[in-house]
Image (cartoon, rainbow, N blue to C red):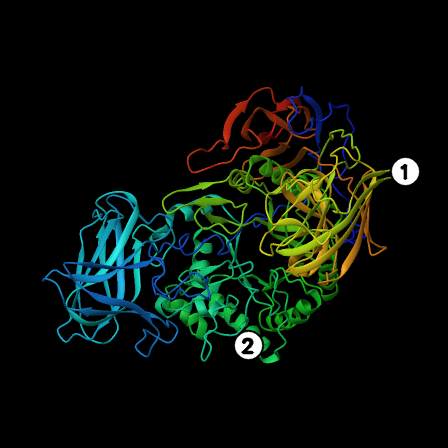
C-alpha cells in the first residue's frame, strides 16, 4: 500500500540531484566475467556552494551488544567479578559462572554465592562465602579460579596488572590470601600476591601482578588458608595500560581504534538497552534485574553500582557507566549524546508504561543527568561528577529520548513531558526524537507526522538493509522537507560484513553528504563485536580477548570520517544503464518460531494455465527443504512445519524461470510466536521475496526482499495472524509489479523498479588544506573510465593524492588477514578536465589542490 514520506520544500533547490546522460557499457550481472571499462562523466561546479558539512557529521554508536562492554571495551579481565550472574541474565547462569573451586596442599572447604545481611552494600547483593576446614599442611589453600572471557585472561610479558578484592573474615587472627595468575595448564604467568585479610568488616585489598610471559588462556586464582569463613566480593584484575591510563578504564586497542575514526559524536548506551524491560528502579523489595538502562545506576563508586540483565542475553555490570562514557567522549573529541528511556518499550516488546509518577521520576532523572554533565560543582550531581574526578562540565548539548519505539502515539505523548521539562530549564539542550525501527512503513510515517506536528528539532532514523537497498536509495534525502526536523541517522548498516556491503554503504554515504543540510549526523552500527559472544552482525570492529581488527566497513567509515571536508561542491555524474527484466523465480513456504500448516498450493500463469498444483494428498516429494531447518511432514492432508523453535525453515518448489503468475496458498497457524512466510521470486535461500504475515512476534506484516542474504522491506502494515484460522492467500506477480490478497481482499501492492546504481560520487572542499576531495564509489565489476570536468574557477595542481579501498566484493577482514585496507598513491596529469579510471569494486578519495590565480 502506498506510503507518504517527508515532502520536499519547493523553496530549496537540489544542488546535485540531476544526472547527466551518457552512452555507457551495461553493468554486468553479479558473478559474470569482468567487463570492459564503462564510460562515465563527472562534472563539478566550483563556482557554487553546496551545503556545509558539520564537524559532527559522522560519529559512533556504542551499545553493549556482542559483549561490547564487559569482556570488551571495559578493560576488566575477571568475568562475573561480583558473583551477580543469575538466571535472570541468562538461563544457564549461576552466581559461580566463570568460577571453579580449587584446592592445594590437601585443603578442603566450600564455596557458595550468598545474598544475606553480610553483603558489601545494598546494591551489590551477592558475594562469595568460603568456609575453610583448616585441613592440609601449612601451605594448604582453598579458593576459586576465574576463567575470564573467550579463551581466558590475556596478558603480555612485562605488563602490569592491578588486582583488587573486597574481603572480610571471621578468623580472629586473620586469613592468609594468595592470588595467582597462571595459564590453563597451571603454568605461572606472574609471581603470586600474598595478603592477610583481617577483621570482619569489608576492606579493599590491592596489589600488582607483572606478567612473566605472554598468553591468552590465563586464569586468576584467589585462595585462602586456615579455617573459618572468608567473604569475597568485587574480585578485579585490570591492565595497568588502559586507554589514557584511566583507572576503571578502557581496553586500549579497542579505544584507540574508535579514536582513530575521529568521531564527531558518541551516542550511548543504546539501543535496545534503554527501551526494554521494566522502567522501575533497582531497589527493594524486588531488585528488578530486567529493566531499562537508567543512568543513576551507573555512577558513583564502582562497587556500589547496580547490575542488570542485558537485553542481549548476558549480565551487565555497569562498571562502564555514564561517567566513563562522558570521559571517553571527551578523550576522543566527540560530542556526548546520551539516550534515556521514554517509558515505551521497543525491540519486540512494544508496551507503553502508563504510570504518571514513574514518568515524572524519569523526567526528573533526565534533568539530573544534564546537571551531572554540565552543572557546577556546588550542585548535587555536579558535585558527584567532581568527586569522581571531573570538576569541569562535560559540555552536554544533545540528548535523545527513546529508541525505535513501535508505538509512535504513545511515544510522542511521553516525549512531550521530557521536552517540556528540558526546554523549560535547559533551552540550550537539543532533545532528539526517533522514527521507529525501519526506514519506511506505518510506524515511520506516523512518527514523522508527529515529529513535524510537535516541532522537534531532530529525528533519529534507524535501518539495516541489503546492499541493493543502499545502492538504490542514494537519493533518499533529496526530497526531505528542509523546513521540518533535521535527520540524525543513528543506526545503519548493510546486512553482512563483506566488502560488497562496504561498497553499498559508501555509495549511500555520498548521498548523506550531498544532503548535509538535512542529514546532520550519521553512525554505522553496531560498533563492537566479541567473536565469542555475537548476538548481531554486521559490526564495525571485531575482537577476541587479545586481538582486535576493523571490518571492511571500518576502513570505509574511517576513510569518510577522516576526509569529510567542510562544504559540498555541487557535482553531477552520469549513470549506468540497466535493463530491468520481470520478477522471476520459484515459490516457497517457511515459518519463524511457529508451527503452521499449508495446503492447496497452486501457481497459475497470467493467461490462466496451471503451472503447479499440490494438495499434498500424494506426499511432499515436489518440495525441497532448502534451508535444512524445521520439521516438515504431511499431516492430515496438509504440509506441516511442527518445530516451534526453528527459524527460517524455507521449503521451495517450482521453476526459477517462472514469471507473471498467481500463487495461491491456504495457511493455518497452529502455535508459536509468529505467522506465515510465503515466498515468491525464489532464486535460492538468500535471494527471494516473501510475504511475512504476523512477523516480529506477530506485531506486523510485510513483504521483504532478500538479496545476497540481506533484507529490505517493500511494504508493510499492522496485520496479525490468529491461531487456528485458515487464511486464503494469493500473490499476483506481473512484470515487476506485485499485488497481494488476503482472504479475497487486496492487502497491498508494490513495484520493485528501483535501480541499484553502482557508480556514485560526491565532491567536498577542505578549507584547511585548500583541496577538493572527489569521492567516487564504483560498486561493479567493470572499471569506471571517467572524464572529470572541474569546470571554471581557480586552477588546480597537476597531481592528486589518492586513497583507495578496493578488492574482491566477498572479501572479509579477519584477525589474521586484512584484504581491504587503504592504498595511497599520487597521480599526474590533473587539470580542470582530465580522465581517470576508477578500479572495479573500489572506493576512491581523490584530493586535488586548488590554486589561486
Q: Residue at x 71, y 36 (%)?
A: 756
The answer to whether residue 761 is left or right of residue 210 is right
CA separation in Å, label 2 and label 1: 65 Å
| Callouts 2 and 1 close, C-beta under 8 Å | no
Circle 2 residues within 10 Å: few <14, some 14–19, many ≥20? few
Q: Secondary structure at mark 1?
A: loop
The answer to whether residue 639 is left or right of residue 333 is right
Res. 357 in view: yes
Residue 486 versus residue 627 in the image, above or below: below
Instruction: Please identify the quarter of the rendering in which residue 383 is found.
Output: bottom left
- Image quadrant holding the C terminus, namely top right
Residue 606 versus residue 249 in the image, above or below: above
The answer to whether residue 473 is left or right of residue 356 is right
Residue 85 versus residue 666 in the image, above or below: below
Task: Please identify, in this view, whether the residue under mark 2 or under mark 1 is nearer the observer.
Answer: 1
For residue 286, which numbered disc appears in the image? none
Q: In the rendered image, which residue does mark 1 sit on?
A: 607
Residue 803: x and y in percent read 53, 30
Q: Nearer the viewer, residue 645 or 543?
A: 645
Circle 1 residues within 10 Å: few <14, some 14–19, many ≥20? few
Q: In the rendered image, which residue does mark 2 sit on?
A: 361
Q: Residue at x 61, y 34 (%)?
A: 775
Amino acid at each position: 500500500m502506498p506510503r507518504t514520506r517527508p515532502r520536499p520544500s519547493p523553496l530549496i533547490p537540489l544542488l546535485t540531484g540531476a544526472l547527466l546522460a551518457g552512452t555507457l557499457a551495461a553493468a554486468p550481472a553479479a558473478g559474470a566475467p569482468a567487463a570492459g571499462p564503462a564510460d562515465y562523466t563527472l562534472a563539478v561546479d566550483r563556482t557554487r556552494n553546496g551545503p556545509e558539512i558539520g564537524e559532527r557529521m559522522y560519529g559512533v554508536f556504542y551499545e553493549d551488544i556482542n559483549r561490547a562492554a564487559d569482556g570488551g571495551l571495559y578493560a576488566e579481565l575477571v568475568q562475573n567479578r561480583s558473583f551477580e550472574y543469575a538466571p535472570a541474565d541468562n538461563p544457564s547462569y549461576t552466581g559461580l559462572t566463570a568460577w571453579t573451586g580449587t584446592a592445594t596442599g590437601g585443603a578442603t572447604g566450600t564455596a557458595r554465592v550468598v545474598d544475606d545481611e553480610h553483603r558489601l552494600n545494598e546494591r551489590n547483593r551477592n558475594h562469595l562465602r568460603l568456609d575453610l576446614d583448616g585441613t592440609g599442611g601449612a601451605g594448604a589453600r582453598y579458593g576459586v579460579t576465574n576463567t575470564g572471557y573467550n579463551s581466558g585472561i590475556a596478558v603480555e610479558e612485562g605488563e602490569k596488572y592491578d588486582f583488587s578484592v573486597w574481603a572480610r573474615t571471621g578468623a580472629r587472627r586473620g586469613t592468609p590470601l594468595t592470588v595467582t595468575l597462571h595459564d590453563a595448564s597451571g603454568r605461572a604467568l606472574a609471581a603470586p600476591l600474598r595478603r592477610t585479610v583481617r577483621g570482619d568488616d569489608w576492606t579493599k585489598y590491592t596489589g600488582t601482578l607483572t606478567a612473566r610471559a605472554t598468553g591468552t588462556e590465563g586464569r586468576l586464582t584467589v585462595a585462602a588458608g586456615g579455617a573459618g569463613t572468608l567473604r569475597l566480593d568485587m574480585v578485579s584484575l585490570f591492565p595497568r595500560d588502559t586507554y589514557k591510563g584511566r583507572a576503571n578504564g578502557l581496553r586500549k586497542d579497542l579505544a584507540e581504534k574508535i579514536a582513530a575514526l575521529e568521531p564527531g559524536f558518541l551516542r550511548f548506551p543504546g539501543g535496545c538497552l534503554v527501551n526494554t524491560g521494566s522502567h522501575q528502579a533497582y531497589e527493594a523489595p524486588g531488585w528488578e534485574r530486567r529493566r531499562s538502562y537508567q543512568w543513576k545506576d551507573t555512577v558513583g563508586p564502582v562497587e556500589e553500582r547496580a547490575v542488570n540483565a542485558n537485553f542481549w542475553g548476558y549480565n551487565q555490570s555497569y562498571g562502564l557507566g555514564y561517567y566513563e562514557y562522558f570521559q571517553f567522549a571527551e578523550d576522543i573529541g566527540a560530542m556526548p549524546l546520551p539516550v534515556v528511556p521514554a517509558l515505551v518499550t521497543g525491540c519486540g516488546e512494544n508496551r507503553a508504561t502508563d504510570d504518571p509518577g514513574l514518568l515524572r521520576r524519569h523526567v526528573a532523572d533526565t534533568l539530573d543527568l544534564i546537571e551531572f554533565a554540565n552543572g557546577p560543582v556546588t550542585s548535587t550531581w555536579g558535585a558527584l561528577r567532581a568527586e569522581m574526578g571531573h570538576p569541569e562540565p562535560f559540555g552536554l548539548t544533545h540528548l535523545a529520548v527513546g529508541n525505535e519505539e513501535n508505538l509512535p502515539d504513545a511515544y510522542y505523548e511521553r516525549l512531550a513531558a521530557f521536552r517540556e521539562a528540558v526546554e523549560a530549564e535547559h533551552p540550550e539542550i537539543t532533545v532528539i526524537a526517533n522514527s521507529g525501527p525501519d526506514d519506511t512503513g506505518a510506524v515511520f510515517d506516523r512518527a514523522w507526522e508527529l515529529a513535524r506536528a510537535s516541532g522537534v528539532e531532530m529525528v533519529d532514523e534507524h535501518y539495516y538493509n541489503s546492499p541493493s537497498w543502499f545502492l538504490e536509495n542514494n537519493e533518499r534525502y533529496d526530497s526531505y522537507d528542509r523546513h521540518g526536523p533535521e535527520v540524525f541517522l543513528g543506526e545503519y548498516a548493510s546486512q553482512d560484513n563483506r566488502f560488497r556491503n562496504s561498497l553499498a554503504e559508501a555509495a549511500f554515504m555520498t548521498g548523506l553528504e550531498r544532503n548535509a543540510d538535512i542529514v546532520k549526523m550519521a553512525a554505522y552500527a553496531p560498533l563492537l563485536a566479541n567473536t565469542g559472544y555475537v548476538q548481531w552482525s554486521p559490526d564495525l570492529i571485531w575482537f577476541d580477548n587479545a586481538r582486535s581488527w576493523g571490518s571492511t566497513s571500518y576502513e570505509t567509515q574511517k576513510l569518510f570520517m577522516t576526509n569529510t571536508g567542510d562544504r559540498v561542491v555541487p557535482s553531477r555524474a552520469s549513470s549506468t544503464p540497466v535493463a530491468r527484466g520481470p520478477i522471476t523465480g520459484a515459490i516457497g513456504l517457511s515459518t519463524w518460531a511457529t508451527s503452521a500448516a499449508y495446503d492447496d498450493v497452486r501457481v497459475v500463469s497470467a493467461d490462466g494455465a496451471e503451472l503447479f498444483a499440490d494438495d499434498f494428498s500424494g506426499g511432499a516429494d515436489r518440495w525441497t527443504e532448502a534451508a535444512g531447518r524445521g520439521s516438515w511432514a504431511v499431516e492430515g492432508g496438509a504440509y506441516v512445519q511442527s518445530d516451534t523453535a526453528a527459524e527460517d525453515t524455507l521449503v521451495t518448489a517450482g521453476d526459477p524461470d517462472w514469471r507473471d503468475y498467481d500463487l495461491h496458498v491456504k495457511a493455518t497457524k497452529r502455535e508459536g510466536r509468529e505467522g506465515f512466510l510465503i515466498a515468491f521470486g525464489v532464486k535460492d535461500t538468500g535471494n527471494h521475496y516473501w510475504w511475512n504475515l504476523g512477523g516480529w512476534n506477530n506485531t506486523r506484516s510485510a513483504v521483504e526482499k532478500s538479496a545476497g542474504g540481506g533484507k529490505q522491506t517493500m511494504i508493510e502494515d499492522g496485520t496479525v495472524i490468529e491461531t487456528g484460522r485458515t487464511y486464503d492467500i494469493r500473490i499476483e506477480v506481473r512484470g515487476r509489479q506485485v499485488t497481494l490478497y488476503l482472504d479475497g481482499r487486496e492487502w497491498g501492492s508494490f513495484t520493485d523498479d528501483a535501480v541499484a546504481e553502482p557508480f556514485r560520487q560526491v565532491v567536498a572542499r577542505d578549507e584547511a588544506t585548500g583541496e577538493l576531495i572527489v569521492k567516487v564509489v564504483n560498486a561493479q565489476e567493470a572499471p569506471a573510465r571517467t572524464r572529470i570536468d572541474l569546470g571554471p574557477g581557480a586552477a588546480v595542481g597537476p597531481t592528486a593524492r589518492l586513497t583507495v579501498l578496493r578488492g574482491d566484493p566477498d572479501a572479509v577482514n579477519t584477525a589474521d588477514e586484512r584484504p581491504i585496507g587503504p592504498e595511497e598513491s599520487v597521480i599526474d596529469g590533473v587539470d580542470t578536465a582530465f580522465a581517470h579510471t576508477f578500479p572495479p569494486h573500489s572506493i576512491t578519495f581523490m584530493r586535488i589542490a586548488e590554486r589561486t590565480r
